[in-house]
Image (cartoon, rainbow, N blue to C red):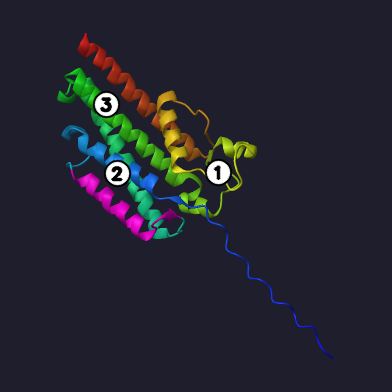
Amino acid sequence: MTGRIPEPTESPSPPESFGEARWPMAAAVVAAMALTLLLPDDLRLAPRWVIPTVEGLLLLALIAGDPGRIDRRSAVLRMTSIALVGILALSAVWSTVQLVDDIVHGGKETASAGSLLQSGGTVWACTVLAFSLLYFELDSGGAAARAHRMPATPALAFPQQLEPRLSPAGWRPRFVDYLYLGLTNATAFSPTDVMPLAPWAKIAMGVQSLVSLLILGLVVARAVNVLA
């Protein structure tokens, strides 16, 4: 009796990766580092070069561990990314608290309209970048996880996810989408086109709105008072 030789089966192909380029995220971190250097000494969390140096080392570790496109899933890289974003967010919130304290008590950074607007604008820009990177890193498990699979229930729902007909097949949110989210949330003080679904996303967007409202409201009021 002769048996039929089974035909060779093709091995399943690995899932397609939609990893995005590293440089937009890296450029945002470098911009935040530069803004930190521009802050007055009283508004920085640590001496001038400490925070930028730590952030730069963490960024270099990320680039070395996952160069080119962000698609390597690694617990070490994930922890490094969260540490980097955490330092950025902590530094931005600290600068906000110190700025508010200077405005209330009449610090030297708020004595003139020019220095007040410069300091306030720098702190505000730092918060926008920090929260944008926070959303970018925490949504759907981070950029590397999103490159391989998008969850059925994301933490942040973009219009392209709510209405798939508006996006091409395999669409993934990129850093520019999170940067736009951080900017609009800081100016409109509420969600615009991106809806927070997870509790952490609602808390983060709420905190950013309050921080932005506090900065812009107090800076403008103080500047008007100084000019008057």
Above or below 102: residue 157: below
Which residue is found at the position 38% from the left and 57% from the top? 67
For the N terminus, give its image quadrant: bottom right
Alpha-carbon neighbours of circle 1 within 10 Å: few (<14), some, or many (≥20)?
A: some
Which residue is found at the position 22% from the left and 49% from the top? 53
Q: Earlier in the sequence, mark 2 or mark 3?
A: 2
**Residue 219 vs residue 69, the one in the foreground:** 69
Label 3 is placed on what type of residue? Gly
Label 1 is placed on what type of residue? Pro
The label nearer to you, 2 versus 1, is 2
x%, y% of residue 105? 19, 21
Above or below 151: residue 219: above
Magenta-span inclusion, residue 175:
no
Report which residue position mark 3 lands on: 120
**Marker count (numbered):** 3
Label 2 is placed on what type of residue? Val
Which numbered marker is on residue 154?
1
Per the model, the C-alpha gap separating discs 1 and 3 is 33 Å
x%, y% of residue 185? 44, 29
Please tell me in which quadrant of the rendered image residue 220 appears: top left
The label nearer to you, 2 versus 3, is 2
x%, y% of residue 212? 36, 27
Per the model, the C-alpha gap separating discs 2 and 3 is 19 Å
Report which residue position mark 2 lands on: 30
Q: Residue furthest left?
A: 108
Please tell me in which quadrant of the rendered image residue 211 appears: top left
For the C terminus, give its image quadrant: top left
- Which region is colored magenta? 49-70
